[in-house]
Image (cartoon, rainbow, N blue to C red):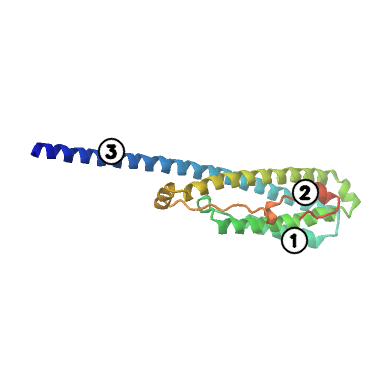
Amino acid sequence: MKSKGCLIGGGIFLILFLICIGIFFWGVSVNNNLVQLNNDVNLKWGNVESSYQRRADLIPNLVGTVNKATNYEKETLTDVINARAKATSVQIDPSNLSPEKLAEFQQAQSGLGSALSRLLVSIERYPDLKANQNILSLQNQLEGTENRIKIDRDNFNQSATTYNIKIQQFPSSIIAGLRGFKEKGLFKADSGAQKAPDVNTLLNGTDNK
């Protein structure tokens, strides 16, 4: 009887041990998947930052060229310069892409986008500026950059949404909570930063907001 009891006890212990091993490897698998998703979000965020930085890098050349060509629109140029300074000052640590932080970043970029739109509209008032090849080249580059920003934002939103769903779903939410994986913010479709200015429309004298 004692031997039989030992066998039963050993069998129960083996079953519990196998269950624990199974849970452990499941947890490792879920954690690794969350790490992979998180890294993908960070990669997409890097692309977003790079596109916005390219826009910021083009603006001084545009402002300088316009400033040399005309003595007007000083207030508009100042607004663009100030908006650029504010936008570039808002930096987000990829490890803290919270909805609040992303909203702050988006608001700053939206302000720069609006100021830039007003500048592009103002250029239409001056035939010499409209015909300036340097300005036309910069406008074309800005148009391509705005399109790139839109694509990178969409890719970021897709990656962040996949990640957010994973950390919210049960039972992976258990591992996410234990390991400190937090919700990522998303660009909002109804925000100014989400709407890339239509440069062609701007060049026809209307502000696409």
Q: How far across and how far down the image is residue 94, in percent?
A: 53, 50
Instruction: Give the residue at mark 2.
Output: 198
Q: In which quarter of the image is residue 92?
A: bottom right
Image quarter where the N terminus lies is top left
Amino acid identity at mark 3: Leu
Distance CA(mark 2)–CA(mark 3): 60 Å
As displayed, is residue 47 above or below residue 68?
Answer: above
Front tag of 2 and 3 = 3
Residue 133 can be seen, yes or no:
yes
**Secondary structure of the residue carrying numbered label 3:** helix
As displayed, is residue 123 above or below residue 21?
Answer: below
Task: State which tag comes first along the sequence, 3 or 1.
Answer: 3
Give the side of residue 118 with respect to residue 149, left or right.
right
Task: State which tag comes first along the sequence, 2 or 1.
Answer: 1
Distance CA(mark 3)–CA(mark 1): 66 Å
Distance CA(mark 2)–CA(mark 1): 20 Å
Instruction: Give the residue at mark 1.
Output: 79
Amino acid identity at mark 1: Asp
- Foreground of the two, 80 or 165: 165
Report crowding for label 2: few under 14, some 14 to 19, many 20 or more residues within 10 A (C-alpha).
some
Task: State which tag comes first along the sequence, 2 or 3.
Answer: 3
Give the side of residue 1 with respect to residue 119, left or right.
left
Q: Residue at point 61% right, 43% down?
A: 155
Front tag of 3 and 1 = 3
Q: Residue at point 42% right, 47% down?
A: 171
Front tag of 2 and 1 = 2
Amino acid identity at mark 2: Asp
Q: Residue 18 carries which label?
A: 3
Residue 90 can be seen, yes or no:
no
Image quarter where the C terminus lies is bottom right
Q: How far across and how far down the image is residue 141, in percent?
A: 75, 43
